[in-house]
Amino acid sequence: MTATIIGGGIIGLSTAYYLQQEGWDVTVLERSDGSDGCSFGNMGYLSPSHFAPLAQPGIISQGILWMFKQKSPFYVRPALSWDLMDWGLKFVRACNAKHVERSARPMAELLLLSRDLTAQWEQSGEMKFDYAQKGCINYFQTAKYEKGELENVRIGRELGLQIEMLDRAQCQALEPELPPDVRGGAWYKDDAMLYPNELMRQLSNLLEKRGAKIIYNAEVIDIQKDKGKISAVKFRKSTDSLTSSETISTPDLVVLAAGSWSQPLAKMAGEYLPMMPGKGYSMTIDVPHQPLRYPCILLEAKVAITPWAKRLRIGSTMEIGAMNDRILFPRVQGILEAVPRFFPGYADDPAFRELADFKKLKENIQEKVWFGYRPLSADGVPYIGFAKNTKNLMIATGHAMLGLSMAAATGKLVSEMAGGKETSIGVGAFEVGRY
């Protein structure tokens, strides 16, 4: 049985891993050279704590307020776009307590399964990517955000997650070298972290070693159908000196896992996915000594920080709209200004001060700041399963900021559904044709 996977990010490669385990002959088509994208610049989190879908009560009113602040973590680029308007209307309708209640358990099950499968990859010895289950601490500075976090903790505990509420002194005791200036925090102990760049490199190498074919710089330009099935996938292969067109004929299975590029590709197959790209930024600095012990999220600023042994990554923002290469400097500035507000010690840290030299940063912003696009479904829940109108097409996208967190489980579920097996967890919440 042959499987063609469109998309060589972490979702596509994870799907290739599990399909290959089940005996499929796998080809992966990746539009880039495989050295960038959200699978590389993300925060490296495996986050069972993120069980609440992006569409939830309060996010619309908060988002509207943020839109008028240049340094805020959220922005919707206005446009006369039917896709944006349709997505927006569906998203607004999903922002209610019933949707969160309905989605929280399947999201948590997907996240926990994925964390465990990813840990198995590291434990098997096949790959090493700095996996560590330290948990993640959500810090808050105000009573308003403490109240919101307490509700999240309540739901998380009902789902069986291990969560410890911390006061100011306890937060500072956990970070003796960089005591946070906070009211308190919530320590989600089920969360883990890894270095995504190393995972991507080793996973792709392992797949190719086992016989998978990964074709880079391969842009899909046409998807042909016959009698309700995909009969051919045509792609343009580009190198430094040559561009050629190639075709994969009569694949038994096609998996669309192209992240934010999935919606136009789905249209080629006659499928509709309500989805928008959400641009996020991150910055990574080398540190000779790592004073921060735990990955954390600064709730009021919506900034995430990941401390690896010799690196520190800081990331945030959600810019919703058409794709472009523009980096909005005020939002980058807002991310970096938030860090010393929560961790005053960073104001005296040489590596951080060099990054936060805003004059130099603005001059070299394309070199210093990474950006990538998260695929946002219309209700904050990923699409995983068979397409509505195409028999041999499966969809695996719409994971928003949780692509790495959900990747292994998504690949496992796709392989199980493709083989007609009982799935490891329920998949009803992720049904592709729910709109």
Image: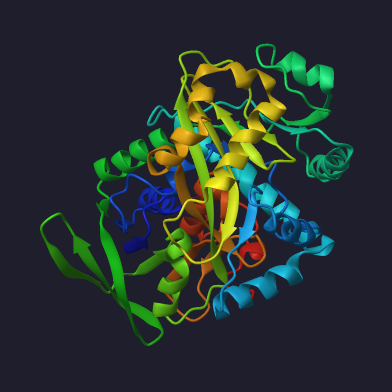
Residue 195 seen: no
Q: Nearer the viewer, residue 17 or 235?
A: 235
Q: Position of residue 174 (x, y in %)?
A: 72, 17
**168 sits left or right of 19 in the view:** right
Furthest residue in direction front, as rendered = 359
Q: Nearer the viewer, residue 378 or 394?
A: 378
Q: Position of residue 398 (x, y in %)?
A: 55, 61
Residue 216 seen: yes
Q: Position of residue 189 (x, y in %)?
A: 70, 29
Identify the residue shown where x is 64% and y is 60%.
Answer: 381
**127 sits left or right of 53 in the view:** left
Image quadrant occupied by the C terminus = bottom right
Furthest residue in direction left, as rendered = 241
Image quadrant occupied by the N terminus = bottom left
Q: Quadrant of residue 178?
A: top right
Identify the residue shown where x is 62% and y is 21%.
Answer: 347
Q: Nearer the viewer, residue 184 or 201?
A: 184
Q: Nearer the viewer, residue 45 or 146?
A: 146
